[in-house]
Image: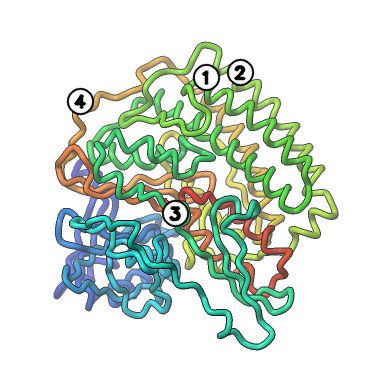
Amino acid sequence: MSEATTPLVPAGLAGLQGDAVTVAAGPQGAVITTTPERLPEVCRRLREQGFDYLADFTAVSHPEPLRVVFRVWSTTARQFAQVVVPVEQAQPVCPTITPFWPAAAWQEREVWDLFGIRFAGNLDLRRILLPENWPGHPLLADYQAPDPNHLLPTIEPDPSNLPEGQTLINFGPQHPSTHGVLRLVVTLAGEEIMAVDPVLGYLHRGIEKLAESRTYPQVIPYTDRLDYVSGVLNNWPYVLAVESLLGVTPPRRAELIRVILGELARITSHLVWLGTFANDVGATSVFLYCFRERERALDLMEEVTGARQTISFFRIGGVPYDLPEGFAERTRDFTRYLRPRLDEYDALLTGNRIFIARAQGVGVLKGADVLPWAVSGPMARASGVAIDLRRSDPYSVYPEIDFAVALEKEGDLLARTRVRMTEMRESARIIEQALEMLEPGPVLAKVPRQIKPEPGAAYGRIESARGDYSAFVVSDGTPKPARVRFRSPSFANLQVLPMLCRGAKVADLIAILGGVDIILGEVDR
């Protein structure tokens, strides 16, 4: 990014400059470097300046020094600030930032788990992706993997410590209604849920660690395996981050193809959600209908990419090849076919007394809790918070396209259903407009044969089917990234599940979990 387009430091942050704190303008927002001792003051000032949303939180160990890196966003001013906190390598300790952004609770646990940085003041600093008995912290640069045969048994919670009249049950990890290998440790008083503790990591595959030993293009196929229900949407933030490091702009036709495929993926993802959620609450017919429509959308994906689910189609600089002949008309046929089907689903579900009884007023997320807990996507918009990154932090050609941001205010399961139904209709509108905007031209920008960005770091950020999906890529000047971090909306949104379930009945647990719409591949990464 040229010097002329580099964002300025917001006036309110310039006053932070001082002893042990530096503030500089970066290409993607202000960059604040501070010591652990000054971090609480920096966080307080950021909150006072309106940075109300924790966009990402992670750490970097290579190139040295070991440092905490997090990014906050002002949803009103639409500005970013990145905070960098170098910590001691021998005994890394950093103050918790949960008093300022509660959403950091799980993300600090993840950084402790993978980097060994302790967060003083975090009241629940346990491992989150790996077992408690796992030796070492795998994302440190000098980490040596252990012999898996020497791992000790996992320590389980002790039910004898519960108050009288309460019981502890395991829901999952092998249960069809967890929609993946998720385990919920549920504390019950009769039929009432007193507490829920999500246990993650059963699908952890170490994709961020694998990325350290792959070249930049070789990382792309791993991104499909994160959210395997909407594969190309996962390619997008990663290639955006690498393009930012390289200073590469994809051709316009490539951007339009990305939008078309991305919105098709959003539709297929919402169809999977709607069908499985309906099945969870007893509406089995809708499950079959949704998968029927999804097959037609996947046929279109396959025409372009040669694959249906793990697609790996986006490239650094665009897409590898053009749309096949006749694709535009076949896609228009699909969007015309889809609209009346969605009307049928409305009649079957959102107007059905049984469905309303299972969904209305259940699993309510208050609008005031959305930003502090960094909830995004349909979950946020169903609670009245109009954050859609295609509008709020626009990218690609979305500023040129006319579409409505789906919004409800009740924050319950019925509102989330309505938001996703509206989004499918709006995605069809977006696809039709993008097809009209297509003009002949290249689909791939010129990039170096060996991709080796200058040392630095960049974010790519998109609105996925589940919300705010970002990739943080750090280059050390070699052909392999020093760090690749994926900020997953499923991980962030799942953190509020205990809040949504407290006081509900056991029968509501399955419905509430389904309404969050998690994909375990991106939760565990």
- Tell whether label 4 touches label 2 (CB within 8 Å): no
Circle 4 sits in a helix, a strand or a loop, which is it? loop
Mark 4 vs mark 1: which is more N-terminal?
A: 1
How many neighbours does mark 4 have within 10 angstroms: few (below 14), some (14-19), or many (20 or more)?
few
Which residue, given by chain and number where applicable, does mark 4 sit on?
A: 449
The correct choice, above or below, for 426 with respect to 327 in the image is below
Q: Which of the labelled discs sits on residue 524, or is there none?
A: 3
Which residue, given by chain and number where applicable, does mark 2 sit on?
A: 330
How many neighbours does mark 1 have within 10 angstroms: few (below 14), some (14-19), or many (20 or more)?
some
Residue lying at the far top in this picture: please name it: 325
- Give the residue drawn at x 41%, y 79%: 123
Q: Is residue 443 left or right of residue 500?
A: left
Circle 3 sits in a helix, a strand or a loop, which is it? helix
Mark 3 vs mark 2: which is more N-terminal?
A: 2
Q: Toward the viewer: 18 or 343?
A: 343
Q: Toward the viewer: 157 or 71?
A: 157
| Residue 176 appears in view | yes
The kind of residue on which mark 2 rests is Arg
Inter-mark Cα distance, 4 to 1: 27 Å
The correct choice, above or below, for 318 with respect to 166 in the image is above
- Give the residue drawn at x 39%, y 19%: 321
